[in-house]
């Protein structure tokens, strides 16, 4: 039971740490400039609470549109929370073994921006309600993955419950859950959690 | 960067500790906020000057509250703060400011100060099939909260420590599981602190991350929460309307009454049992186009928002008043009647004595869309229209009741009154000074 619980705890940490909130890792993202309203799909303003997808109701001529395209700038880096659907897909992709047994993410429907967009990074923040629901989702997934019959499939070495198996798990699932390359520092951090839990 | 995070949280921690010190000992107070949109036709709501005759005006919207009259205060003359008006006032109703910019709703401020959870339940609180949007932004806990829409789910949330019927209570998490959770949360906290380094110069993104950090820290702290009441029930009480909603669609029109009354039953029983101390019931939303002909309802095949709340003629305003009266009747039957029993945690008083129920709306007159005290003309006769704000319950002895209080104040003073009644007095909301109207104090 200890190895199951430890794996569960590790998984929980993964889920909490990865799907809840992620930055672009320092890369410049070419997203719409809020103030200019020149963004493409998913363009998101960067001002607090802004829905800066251009001035509502403003009609631009072709020349104006071209002019704005030429003067478009790369927007600032954004912190994006996964949408409800993105989180669902991420977990389903990482753990296809849960198909049929997992009830799905416990997040409330994503709040819409004033323009009706439900993927606006300025709106999709992680305050207490979302954090709590992410925790509940993570615990659900962790319990299912660590359950008998599933864990052996997800992590055949789990019976050993040792550090090497933890490293395998972290290496195999870290990038898939973070949706980007997993750094050594991050791997070490999760290994540290395993070591702490295992003692 | 870590210091930045700590620096931002220190004032908050100081404020919370100050509030906690201000809490009185003794009376186990509770708070229930009930929101119903689109105001009320004042000619069917107001009581004659110098009386508490709930049935004297038109159809008597207040008449369902007659059995609880000694617990009621009508706050006559309130104006919404920040010039919040019309449908947009929904976001200012509990935060004090339009858009709730930089301010949490009062339920959250109070719950955090008490170290307990602010629950939010909702009857179709946003458009069916749509996403929560600005028309439904009522409760803000760092960000706008999406209410629990099915009362069956609400019962699970508010009574998680009590199994249904006589079933044994579910096992508490083992110590090791709790440890795992806290360690995982601590790891996440550390990652977020580190992530702040990548956000140098991006104020909006730092604020976003800070919000996330505080949420994680609150999750950690909640397991040690000391502000909850002692649970006084052994089993989950019977809540028929909520139980009827198990496995059903809370947005189905046919289920509207069960959803609405189920939430009232869940909230009322949770307050009695002490499994919840602060809750909000969010009924519909600004612009709600929901017909009032659902089974068990008021029986009008017209939308709540338009045409009902927009009615300008006598017949239409009477219909809207009848509809609003139906909601008041449900509050009386499924909430107040349950609260009007000896408090298991304080047998010398009723739960209602120890509770403050705040009934509110975002506008005064649905047809005029005013959210401030305003003179309006009806059939050639001038009348004062004001947001229908009621305080029901004694608030642990803090509130004066059975009265019409002439509270010509900004509504933030009413929010301050809620906080004071709950034992966590506040002097400012969003940097603006607030005070409790003396008329409201016992």
Image (spheres, helix red, strand yellow):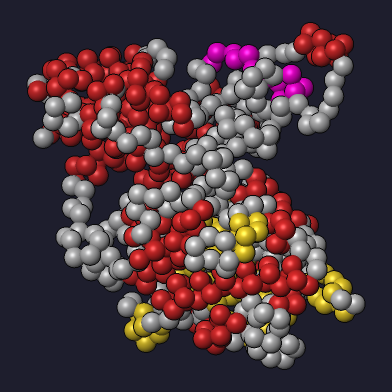
Residue B373: % across, % down:
79, 70
Q: Residue at x 19, y 30 (%)?
A: A146
Q: Residue at x 71, y 56 (%)?
A: B306
Q: Is residue B438 above or below residue A137?
A: below
- Specify whether B351 is left or right of B77: left
On screen, residue A129 versus residue B275, left or right, reads right
Q: Nearer the viewer, residue A195 or B378?
A: B378
Q: For residue B303, which quarter of the picture? A: bottom right
Question: Residue B48: horizontal and vertical position, in percent?
Answer: 73, 87
- Pick the front one: B140 or B56: B56
Query: Does residue B142 sit above or below A160 in this rendering?
Result: below
Report whether B210 appears left or right of A30. Answer: left
* Residue B201 in sight from this viewpoint: no
On screen, residue A43 above or below A9: above
Q: Is residue A20 magenta?
A: no
Farthest residue to the right: give it. Answer: B380
Of the pair B330 and A65, the residue shown nearer to us: B330
Question: What secondary structure predominates along the stretch shown in magenta?
Answer: loop
Which residues, given as a range, are shown in magenta? A26-38
Q: Is residue A36 magenta?
A: yes
Query: Residue B137, how many percent across, how many down?
Result: 61, 49
């Amino acid at each position: 039971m200890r190895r199951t619980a430890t794996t569960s705890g590790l998984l929980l940490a993964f889920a909490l740490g990865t799907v809840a909130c992620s930055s672009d890792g320092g890369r410049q993202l070419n997203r719409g400039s809020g103030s200019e309203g020149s963004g493409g799909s998913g363009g998101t303003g960067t001002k607090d609470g802004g829905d800066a997808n251009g001035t509502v109701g403003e009609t631009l001529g072709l020349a104006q549109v071209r002019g704005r395209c030429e003067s478009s700038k790369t927007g600032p880096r954004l912190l994006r929370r996964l949408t409800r659907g993105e989180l669902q897909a991420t977990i389903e992709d990482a753990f296809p073994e849960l198909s049929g047994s997992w009830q799905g993410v416990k997040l409330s429907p994503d709040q819409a921006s004033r323009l009706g967009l439900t993927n606006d990074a300025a709106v999709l923040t992680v305050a207490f309600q979302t954090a709590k629901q992410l925790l509940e989702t993570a615990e659900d997934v962790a319990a299912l993955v660590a359950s008998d019959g599933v864990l052996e499939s997800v992590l055949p070495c789990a019976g050993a419950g040792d550090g090497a198996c933890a490293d395998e798990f972290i290496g195999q699932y870290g990038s898939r859950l973070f949706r980007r390359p997993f750094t050594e520092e991050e791997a070490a951090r999760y290994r540290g959690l395993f070591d702490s839990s295992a003692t | 960067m870590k210091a930045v995070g700590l620096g931002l949280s220190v004032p908050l921690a100081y404020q919370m500790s100050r509030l906690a010190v201000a809490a009185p000992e003794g009376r186990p107070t509770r708070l229930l906020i009930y929101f119903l949109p689109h105001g009320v036709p004042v000619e069917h709501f107001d009581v004659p000057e110098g009386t508490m005759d709930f049935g004297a005006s038109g159809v008597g919207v207040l008449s369902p509250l007659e059995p609880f009259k000694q617990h009621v205060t009508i706050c006559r003359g309130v104006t919404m703060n920040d010039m919040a008006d019309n449908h947009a006032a929904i976001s200012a109703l509990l935060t004090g400011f339009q858009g709730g910019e930089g301010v949490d709703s009062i339920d959250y401020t109070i719950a955090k100060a008490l170290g307990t959870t602010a629950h939010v339940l909702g009857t179709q609180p946003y458009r069916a099939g749509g996403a929560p949007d600005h028309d439904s932004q009522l409760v803000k806990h760092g960000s706008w909260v999406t209410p629990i829409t099915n009362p069956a789910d609400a019962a699970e949330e508010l009574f998680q420590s009590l199994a249904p019927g006589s079933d044994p209570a579910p096992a508490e998490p083992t110590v090791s599981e709790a440890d795992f959770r806290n360690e995982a949360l601590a790891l996440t906290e550390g990652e977020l602190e580190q992530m702040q380094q990548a956000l140098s110069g991006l104020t909006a993104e730092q604020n976003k991350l800070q919000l996330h950090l505080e949420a994680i820290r609150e999750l950690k702290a909640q397991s040690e929460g000391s502000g909850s009441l002692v649970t006084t029930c052994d089993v989950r009480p019977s809540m028929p309307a909520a139980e009827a909603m198990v496995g059903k669609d809370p947005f189905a029109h046919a289920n509207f009454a069960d959803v609405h009354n189920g939430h009232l039953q869940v909230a009322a029983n949770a307050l009695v049992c002490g499994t919840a101390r602060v809750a909000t019931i969010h009924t519909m939303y600004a612009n709600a186009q929901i017909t009032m002909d659902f089974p068990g309802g008021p029986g009008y095949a017209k939308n709540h928002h338009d045409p009902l709340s927009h009615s300008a003629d006598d017949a239409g305003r009477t219909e809207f008043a009848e509809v609003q009266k139906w909601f008041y009747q449900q509050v009386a039957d499924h909430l107040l009647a349950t609260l009007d029993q000896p408090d298991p945690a304080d047998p010398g008083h009723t739960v209602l004595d120890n509770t403050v129920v705040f009934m509110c709306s975002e506008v005064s007159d649905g047809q005029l869309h005013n959210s401030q005290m305003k003179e309006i003309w009806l059939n050639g006769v001038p009348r004062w229209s004001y947001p229908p704000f009621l305080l029901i319950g004694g608030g642990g002895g803090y509130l004066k009741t059975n009265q019409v209080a002439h509270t010509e104040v900004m509504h933030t003073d009413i929010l301050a009154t809620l906080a004071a009644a709950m034992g966590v007095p506040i002097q400012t909301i969003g940097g603006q000074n607030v005070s409790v109207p003396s008329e409201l104090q016992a």
